[in-house]
Structure formats: C-alpha cells, structure tokens
Image (cartoon, rainbow, N blue to C red):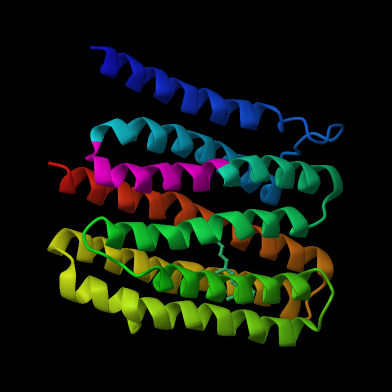
Amino acid sequence: MFQGFFKSLRNKCLLGLSLLGLSTSVFATSGQVLQSSDFVGITFWLISMALVASTAFFFLERDRVAGKWKTSLTVSGLVTLVAAVHYFYMRDVWVATGSTPTVYRYIDWLITVPLLMIEFYLILSAITKVSTGVFWRLLIGTLVMLVGGYVGEAGYADVTTAFIVGMAGWFYILYEIFAGEAGKISANKAPATVQKAFNTMRLIVTIGWAIYPLGYYFGYLTGADPASSMASLNIIYNLADVLNKIAFGVIIWSVAVSESK
Ligand SMILES: *C/C=C(C)/C=C/C=C(C)/C=C/C1=C(C)CCCC1(C)C
C-alpha cells in the first residue's frame, strides 16, 4: 500500500517538476504576440504544446511497463521536456524578432540528441550486455555532426564546409547502428519485438534525421532570399522534431508496453 502511495507521489513530483520548468519560460520574451499570418510561429506553438503533452504521457506511462523499460520511458520524457522548454524560448525569439533562434536550437540538440543515442544503448541493454564503447562512439558521431552544423549556421565557418563535416558525423552514426557493434547485437541477440523497434528507430535516424540536413540546405545553400530561407529552415526543423522526438518516444513506449506483458 505504501509502495503504491510513494509511486504515485513520485510520479506527481516528476510531472510537477516538468510543468515548473515549462511555466518559468513561457514569458521569456514579451511584447509581440503571435500573428495569424505567422505560419512558422504557429508551428513553434503547436510543437511546444505537443512536447508538453508527450512529456506528461511518457512520465505517467512508466507505471505500466516492466522495471527494465522504465529508464527508456524516462529518457523519452526528458527529451520532450528539454525540447519543450527550448521551444518556448525559440518560439518567443521567432515571434518577437522574426529571426532564427540558432543558439537555442543547438543547445537543445546538444542535450536531446545524445539522449536519443542513449535510447539505442538502453533498448539493447534491456535485453543483453552491451559494451559502453557503443555509447561513446554514438556520442562522438553526434558531437561532430552538431559542432559542424553550429559553426556553419552561426557564421563561424564556411556554410558548405561545415555542412560536409556535419554530414560525416551523421554517416558515422549510421555506420555504427547498421554495420557496427550496435547493429550486430540487435541482429544476433534481440527478441523479435525489440529487433522491430530497433529497426524502426534506425529508420528514424536515417530518414527522419535526413530532414535536418534538408532544412540546412534550404536555409543556407540555395541562394534564396534570407526571409524565405529562414522560414523554410525553421518549418523543416520543427516538423523534423515532431517525428524524431515524439514519434521516436512513442515507438519505444509501444515496445516497452508489449514486452512488459
Ligand atoms: C531532437 C533533435 C534532433 C534529433 C536533431 C537532429 C539533428 C540532426 C540530425 C542534424 C544534422 C545535420 C547534418 C547531418 C549536417 C549538418 C547540419 C545538421 C547539423 C543540421
């Protein structure tokens, strides 16, 4: 009885914490309000709210799954929580100034992308012993990809060279999850449901993540005028986040639920 009480108390604390984090950033910048013609701004709003709802969902659903899956759901909830808070800031920057919130975007990625990489590690660890090398190699690929993108977008390096460096980091991640140790573990040791989840997650990292370099391309490499390039960049990045943060978490959730029965 006490156990149940503490469990639900802990869940409420988790939720409370996430909402606190969100409420402090709602009025990060004030002054401008969202215009009905600002479609990029509308996507920032929609996604902020979807991220808040997903966070509550992942944290509450922890109770439904077996112990070894709980960490995976916690990490999914952290990804959407961290992103939700950044979305509040990014949305305000966009609505108030019409400029691209590059620095908030990359701080968000710097935290959420490694968390997503941890998910690969966790999902495999839930079924077998995995060397930590898998995790470190995925992390190195991530850092090369993001540092490359940031120095290009923030104007510290030539946009094309920086793009190539970022692409190299991403290809390295793909190599690791398809042909490297992580891929082999999944193919040889994982039960069918986990393999299916691993394959879908892999597909997301291939196809879902490919949307980001497309955003970069339309933002910086087409030579279109800055206003329309920045609108494309932000819309593309925003839509990519729905798939790669929320849908990714939902896939993990569905395996966790079915493997817990
Ligand atoms: C939740 C946020 C996620 C999953 C962000 C992912 C970001 C990328 C996959 C970015 C990739 C890029 C390249 C592959 C080339 C250089 C430009 C980047 C950083 C946009």
Q: Which residues are magenta?
A: 65-81
Q: Is residue 159 above or below residue 40?
A: below
**x and y, in percent, of residue 28 in the image:** 79, 35
Residue at point 33% right, 22% down?
7
Q: How many marks?
A: 0
Q: Is residue 29 visible in this depiction of the protein?
A: yes
65 relative position to 215: left or right? left
Ligand 1 lies in quarter? bottom right
Residue nearest the viewer, comparing 123 with 224: 123
Viewer-proximal residue, 57 or 129?
129
Examine the structure image and report whether residue 250 is included in the region drawn in magenta. Answer: no
Quarter of the image for residue 63 reads top left
Asked whether, in this view, residue 22 is left or right of residue 209, the answer is right
Residue 220 position, x and y percent, is 75, 76
Is 48 on the left-hand or right-hand side of 94?
A: left
Determine if residue 37 is in view: no
Q: Residue at x 53, y 61 (%)?
A: 114
Q: Quadrant of the N terminus?
A: top left
Q: Position of residue 254 (x, y in %)?
A: 26, 47
